[in-house]
Amino acid sequence: MSASSGRRFRSVLVRVTGVTAGLGAVLAVSMVLAANIGTEPVPLAVIVDSARSYLAELIGRLEGRGMSAGMVDAIRRYLMRPPLTVEPQLAYIFWSLRLPRVVLGSVVGMALTVAGGSLQGLLMNPLADPYLVGVSAGAALGASAGIVLHVSDFAGGAGQSLLAFASGALTMALVLWLARSQRRIQRDAFILAGVVVGSFMWALVTLLMTMAGRDLQSVVFFLMGSLHRQDLDWGIVGVAALMVGVGCVWLYSYARDLNVLALGEEQARQLGVETEQLKIGVILASALITAAAVSVSGIIGFVGLVMPHIVRKLFGPDHRVLLPAAGLLGASFLVWADTLARAIGETFPVGVLTALLGAPFFFYLLKTRARAG
Amino acid sequence: MLEALTLTIGYAEEPVLREVSLSVERGRFVGVVGPNGSGKTTLVRALSRVLPPLDGRVLLDGIDIYQMRADAVARRLAVVSQDNAVYFEFPVREVVLMGRAPYLSRFGIERPRDYEIAGECMELTHTTMLADRPITALSGGERQRCMIARALAQRPDVLLLDEPTAHLDINHQIEILDLTRSLTAERGLATVVVMHDLNLASQYCDHMVMLARGRVFASGTPAEVVTEERIRAAYGTDVQVRRHPATGRPYVTLLSRLPIPAPATRKTKVHLICGAGTGVQLMRRLRELGFALSVGVVNVADSDQVEAEAMDLQRVEEAPFSPISDEAHQRNSDLARSADVVVVTGMPFGRGNLRNLQAAGRALGTGRQVLLIDDPPIPGRDFTDGEAIALQAQLVNAGAELCGDEAGVVARLERMR
């Protein structure tokens, strides 16, 4: 009996591995393809060869540090055969101009989708997304203030992002404080507080815009949500990726607790879930990655709202599968949406596109769900 | 196993329950009953480590559960709550598997042993065939069984069930109670069940706790707890409590306060002589059984008169608190003579209503059958210095039958053709 009933269950490890491998491959292919699309197509050979030469250079640096000259020489010879097609300009376009933007797109897409999926699970509200709970408005205020105050003049490119992040985190703290009563975070109050604080922050942003003068255009452009930045380099991408990576792992540690929470808050506590820790953890971690995303890309709407719904339809509600799947699919989605935006114009804001695509798709989801129910 | 010591429980420092103590041992099936708002669910919340009591302690094998980690408690104590809605469309097997959550570390995943246990719990609760269905698509009874499977997958020592049979059909109620009851015995669980239905509680429980007025109102065996007096005091309603013929356990019959508009379906015509509220239940019962009924002499505003009027019965009335007049006596006698059977309730007799017995005597004289309910016995309700006792003795001599109680009368009438 036990053997037969055992077969009814599919190990979550198998499902996670399968989904992650599949969607990870989709994302990798998407990124390479997307980075290759543009006014100047970069042949695959150039990409591969420049990677080979970079690798060879890296290996060269290892000489004398744990590797004998002979070994280094052997590997380098292997890497250099067949001979390289050297096109430094094309290689530069691919590695230093397009790929950072594509990677940033995937990082932002992953951040928004994972944050949206986690918040929907935590708040048991299909409308929850990173923008509903006020963080993004707070981060937008910080970034706008950074533009108007010209922080980048003395703090460099990271100044504006730092200000955005700090302001987003502070907003989250305010919302959390408002939603807390009787030593508990009330989930309904949290949504309400998020919406109200968010509106307040948006009002401040608008106020700032009236005083922005010559910087108004920069602020407006930032708020529209775009992956285009003059100062984009691997440093900015790296910091964003690090924060989003840490936040995603942090959120993933709550995946099973979020499943149990679907039985109800009290039931979850009776099943051993420390729900207050869960709420604070999920809110802080999603605030972290949302603020990180907004600080580098502005307001890119609907990705965090719609993508988790699609993924839930495809792979079921188990957050242990849902979160990685949503992250990878959200990343791929934003990579392609941004490619489309780039095709329209190098500075065309991708936020406009995601809203244009996302909203009708959400209507479709709503209608089909109503029919199914 | 599970012990509650003088718990005071409430919300925002406002106690709902005070001084609640109870103790449940392995293999025992303890029922918690009480009217709406008496704090049954509040008690379950306190016992399951979700509502810290304002005062008192909850001990699991001697250890205060509020001093234990949540997952440590969840490995020993499982709860099936009233609200079993699930937010996402998890398949049933995933929900049952959630019962293993307290045994897993943060990034831990279920091992074959967990699947085995979950599968076994599904077999026990007959939910195996539901394994792949989304929990949100199930009926209330199916979902409740899944939740019991989930609770069993926790491998608990203590099982708390909060109205597990609410919203279920009678067949599912029996199924779930049979299941939990037998699991309690087989696995040596200590089970606490909050129940709405006094009869189900009385049939299934070894021990019952009745909550009312913010405290433990009664506690003991079903026979000790389920009594007419206790229910009247706790619930504020009149019921009849009998012994269940098969189980010997107390059995509660609800008595409606509204008239039962049953038409007379029997030919036997009964004239009921009553007063001071002694006839209400019999009127309802006899109408229910379809007897044609007339009533006399009842004083206006007496509960017998109110009931007879509500049922729109043929009746003889007298002014409030007034002795039976000649005219009323005459009409009462006429109605008694026109009936097939005359029933006299165990009402108190004073000089004002002694004529009721005389009217019964007249009917007896014209060959009508007369049934006297001697409950309580006549000496206790004779306020005429023995006249009523003498009159009743005369009636019995002349052929009237003495019945022990209302049930006896009903049985006697039902046997008549």
Image (tube, coloured by chain):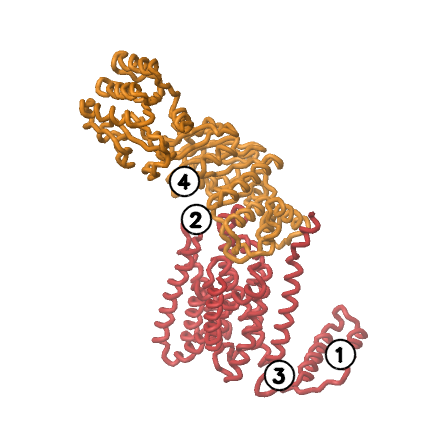
Chain colours: A red, B orange
User: What distance separates the C-alpha of mark 2 from that of mark 3?
Assistant: 55 Å
Among the 4 quarters of the image, the one containing residue B296: top left
- Could you say whether the residue bearing mark 1 is in a helix, strand or loop? helix
In the rendered structure, are the residues bearing label 2 and label 3 in contact, judged by CB atoms less than 8 Å apart?
Answer: no
Identify the residue shown where x is 52% and y is 65%: A309
Q: Residues within 10 Å of mark 2 (few under 14, many from 20)?
A: few
Q: Which residue is mark 3?
A: A92
Tell me which chain the residue with mark 3 is part of: A
In the rendered structure, are the residues bearing label 1 and label 4 in contact, judged by CB atoms less than 8 Å apart?
Answer: no
**Mark 1 vs mark 3: which is more N-terminal?**
1
Among the 4 quarters of the image, the one containing residue A244: bottom right
Of badges 1 and 4, nearer the viewer stands 4
Tell me which chain the residue with mark 1 is part of: A
Q: Are marks 2 and 3 on the same chain?
A: yes
Q: Which residue is mark 1?
A: A79
Of badges 4 and 3, nearer the viewer stands 4
Question: Where in the figure is residue A298, as x and y percent of width and height?
Answer: 47, 73
Question: Where in the figure is residue A353, as x and y percent of width and height?
Answer: 48, 77
In the rendered structure, are the residues bearing label 1 and label 2 in contact, judged by CB atoms less than 8 Å apart?
Answer: no
Q: Are marks 1 and 3 on the same chain?
A: yes
Of badges 1 and 2, nearer the viewer stands 2
**Kind of residue at badge 1:** Leu
Q: Which residue is mark 4?
A: B10
Q: Give A274 or A236, whichever is nearer the viewer.
A: A274
